[in-house]
């Protein structure tokens, strides 16, 4: 009798990743920390431990000892679909990797599993599947005409044609949360930093495609995007590229070199790192309290800036250097921070789950901004350094605080927007 | 005192031929299991975002090549030195210590106990083999007595670790709820191996009437406890108990590694090393 073909084809997973599955000791530490597992009300399938166990059983059923001797066991389509739903219920925040006692690189594992499922036609999740075509057609993730990338630029902002420093806007700051782009440009102008942008020629960084396992679609789209951006940046003569979006920053630092098979020929920096350097060099003079009066401020580490690439201290240094800002730290901070809930395609694929996680994170901030017994009428500040985090945390705040009386009025702003305020600059175009 | 082979004691020892056969079968099973595991890992690709190359699926070379490549590559995280990973993360289980001191304590007891007993058994076996081939540089009987104390200490460490592991699974609600057969088989088999080990070892000594543990009398009393005061069945069937323990130890605690959750004892250290200590 002919043997059944394995239900699972090993695509996109490396030999080392297959070994990592066997390294899991099922201690459950990942489940203790996973924000979406908690945000879902502890749905068993969302636990990282459970995902590793199930995928490992898929691999064993197809290629394990007994499968090799007696033929593969069938994995039903329902099992694959259920797994697809669960593996997409992950923000790829990476806390599971941070706490993993076996040191498993779980984020890469989830992304590889997603890519595998996309290749077999089971993934991605919901409307995430529209992203490759949209990005291929428009080179941005919002289906906007490319000239809209420049709509945010106010008349007073000076952008050079070519410069040593290039500001990579990103789709979100360039087209949706334009206050961030306006703030970044004005802050750089104020500090006397000559900079250029890629203008209309800027392409999506590709992060959303990689995180959702669709990087190879549309004829290796993510690679083409990286190539386009790198070539355009080289043509501008830039030696340093600044990012205010943590997702783009991570993509440029980690994903572009991997997609292109070589290091990028320029230095990649987040704006908070750049500002921290300037502050250290004594080149930044804050001119006022950002909000006119004293505020308590706490900072949320975006996963893509913190855990993924290790930038923790610079954003704190920037905030702590400002007048009128009393800095407090949340219990869960730096490598042990709780994700905002937006990443990994969860905001677009599972908005309810994203909101649930965001509410928990705003709750973390509330605990330190308004200690027990303090009235919640004062306005305090919840800072972060990623437009995606800002959007989701704002949604979380609105949902969490809607029913509260008196209602705390938490300002959720990007560190660059707060910097602009402290320099006496406006965040809005006009 | 005369002695026979494989850590036995004259009069109640297992035969050399039986133990050698069992040992070789266990080693063979272990190697076969490891081969199948590495072959399974070799189904993967050689790098990020790639599909496995045609004609190379299931190649053990692919696994070793990919492992070496990743080991040599730059890490965006701290990328600590391999020695630091080996000492702090693999041997001292630093990542576990950070997460849960109780689990670390349990894991260390099992780790040290298991590795220690395994090493000392290997050392005893080596001494006997050397003696058997006619090189008499170390008296096996003396060496066996010398190992009484460390063996007993390591055995108790292992036993305590296994008891803590069982207690966690039984009495901590979250742990209990998430325990499945994959976890349970590991702990139960380990418990059986340890308990039979104590009984077999104690039985062998009591059966030959050895009571002189000068300076280490507590070991004698300890042996009495494991045989319930030298109860007849423990002494009459000591050979069978010893054989059962030896077979269990070889097959469950050794040959079973690649076919069970025990595989983490190999895959987890390899993971920590290749990921340069992991994140954070």
Image (cartoon, coloured by chain):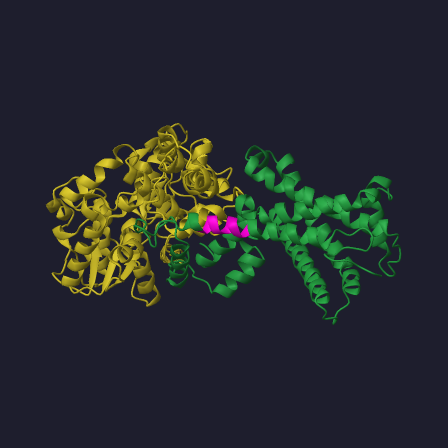
Chain colours: A yellow, B green
A176 left or right of A123 in image: left
Q: Which residues are magenta?
A: B30-38
B250 left or right of A162 in image: right
Which quadrant holds residue B168? top right
Q: Is residue B252 above or below residue B128?
A: above
How far across and down, in percent of the image, does residue A53 sit? Answer: 47, 39
Say which of A316 and B270 sits in front: B270
Say which of B150 and B175 sits in front: B150
A48 left or right of A129 in image: right
The question of residue B220 being in magenta is answered with: no
How far across and down, in percent of the image, does residue A249 sit? Answer: 29, 54
How far across and down, in percent of the image, does residue B190 sit? Answer: 65, 44
Say which of A265 and B30 sits in front: B30
Residue in the image at 22% along x and 43% along y: A217
- Say if residue A331 shows up in the picture: no
A258 left or right of B29 in image: left
Q: Is residue A249 above or below residue A239?
A: above
Q: Quadrant of the N terminus of chain B?
A: bottom right
Residue in the image at 21% along x and 36% along y: A130
The question of residue B33 being in magenta is answered with: yes
Residue in the image at 55% along x and 62% along y: B87
**Magenta stretch prevailing secondary structure:** helix
- Say if residue A384 shows up in the picture: yes
How far across and down, in percent of the image, does residue A180 sit? Answer: 24, 48
Count up the numbered dots.
0
């Amino acid at each position: 009798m002919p043997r059944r073909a394995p239900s699972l084809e090993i695509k996109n997973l490396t030999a080392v990743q297959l070994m990592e599955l066997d390294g899991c000791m099922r201690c459950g530490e990942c489940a203790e920390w996973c924000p979406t597992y908690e945000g879902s009300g502890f749905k068993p399938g969302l636990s990282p431990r459970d995902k590793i166990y199930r995928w490992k059983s898929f691999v064993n059923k197809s290629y394990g000892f007994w499968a090799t001797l007696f033929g593969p066991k069938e994995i039903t389509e329902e099992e694959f679909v259920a797994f697809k739903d669960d593996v997409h219920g992950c923000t790829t925040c990476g806390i599971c990797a941070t706490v993993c006692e076996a040191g498993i690189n779980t984020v890469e594992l989830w992304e590889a599993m997603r890519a595998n499922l996309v290749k077999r036609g089971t993934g991605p999740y919901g409307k995430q599947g529209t992203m490759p075509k949209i990005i291929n057609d428009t080179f941005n993730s919002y289906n906007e005409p490319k000239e809209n990338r420049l709509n945010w630029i106010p008349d007073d902002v000076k952008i050079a044609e070519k410069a040593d420093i290039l500001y990579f806007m990103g789709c979100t700051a360039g087209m949706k949360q334009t206050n961030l782009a306006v703030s970044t440009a004005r802050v750089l102008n104020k500090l006397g930093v000559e900079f250029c942008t890629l203008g209309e020629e800027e392409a999506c960084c590709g992060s959303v495609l990689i995180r959702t396992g669709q990087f190879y679609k549309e004829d290796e789209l993510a690679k083409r995007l990286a190539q386009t951006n790198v070539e355009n940046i080289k043509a501008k003569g830039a030696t340093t590229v600044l990012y205010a979006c943590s997702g783009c920053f991570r993509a440029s630092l980690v994903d572009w070199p991997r997609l292109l098979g070589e290091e990028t020929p320029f230095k990649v920096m987040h704006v908070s790192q750049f500002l921290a350097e300037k502050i250290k060099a004594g080149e930044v003079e804050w001119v006022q309290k950002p909000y006119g009066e004293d505020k308590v401020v706490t900072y949320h580490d975006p996963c893509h800036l913190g855990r993924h690439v290790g930038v923790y201290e610079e954003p704190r240094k920037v905030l702590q250097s400002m007048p009128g800002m009393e800095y407090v730290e949340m219990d869960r901070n730096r490598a042990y921070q709780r994700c905002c809930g937006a990443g990994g395609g969860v905001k677009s694929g599972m908005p309810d789950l994203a909101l649930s996680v965001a509410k928990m994170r705003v709750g973390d901030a509330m605990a330190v901004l308004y200690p027990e017994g303090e009235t919640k009428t004062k306005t305090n500040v919840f800072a972060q350094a990623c437009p995606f985090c800002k959007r989701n945390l704002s949604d979380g705040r609105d949902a969490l605080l809607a029913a509260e009386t008196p209602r705390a009025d938490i300002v959720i702003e990007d560190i660059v927007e707060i910097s602009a305020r402290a320099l006496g600059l406006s965040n809005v175009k006009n | 005192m005369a002695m026979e082979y494989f850590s036995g004691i004259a009069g109640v020892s297992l035969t050399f031929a039986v133990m050698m056969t069992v040992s070789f079968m266990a080693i063979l099973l272990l190697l076969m299991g490891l081969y199948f595991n590495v072959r399974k890992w070799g189904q993967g690709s050689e790098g990020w975002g790639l599909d496995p190359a045609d004609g190379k699926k299931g190649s053990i070379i692919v696994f070793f090549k990919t492992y070496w490549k990743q080991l040599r590559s730059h890490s965006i995280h701290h990328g600590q030195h391999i020695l630091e990973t080996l000492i702090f993360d693999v041997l001292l289980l630093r990542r576990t210590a950070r997460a849960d001191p109780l689990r670390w304590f349990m894991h260390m007891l099992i780790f040290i106990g298991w590795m220690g007993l395994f090493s000392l058994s290997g050392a005893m076996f080596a001494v006997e083999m050397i003696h058997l081939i006619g090189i008499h540089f170390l008296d096996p009987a003396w060496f066996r007595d010398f190992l009484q104390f460390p063996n007993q200490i390591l055995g108790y460490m292992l036993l305590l670790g296994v008891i803590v592991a069982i207690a966690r699974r039984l009495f901590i609600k979250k742990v209990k709820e998430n325990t499945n057969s994959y976890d349970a088989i590991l702990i139960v088999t380990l418990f059986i191996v340890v308990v039979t080990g104590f009984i077999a070892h104690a039985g062998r000594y009591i059966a030959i009437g050895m009571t002189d543990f000068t300076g280490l009398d507590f070991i004698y009393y300890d042996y009495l406890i494991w045989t319930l005061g030298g109860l007849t069945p423990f002494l009459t069937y000591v050979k069978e108990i010893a054989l059962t323990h030896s077979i269990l130890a070889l097959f469950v605690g050794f040959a079973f590694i690649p076919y069970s959750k025990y595989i983490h004892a190999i895959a987890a250290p390899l993971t920590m090393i290749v990921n340069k200590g992991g994140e954070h």
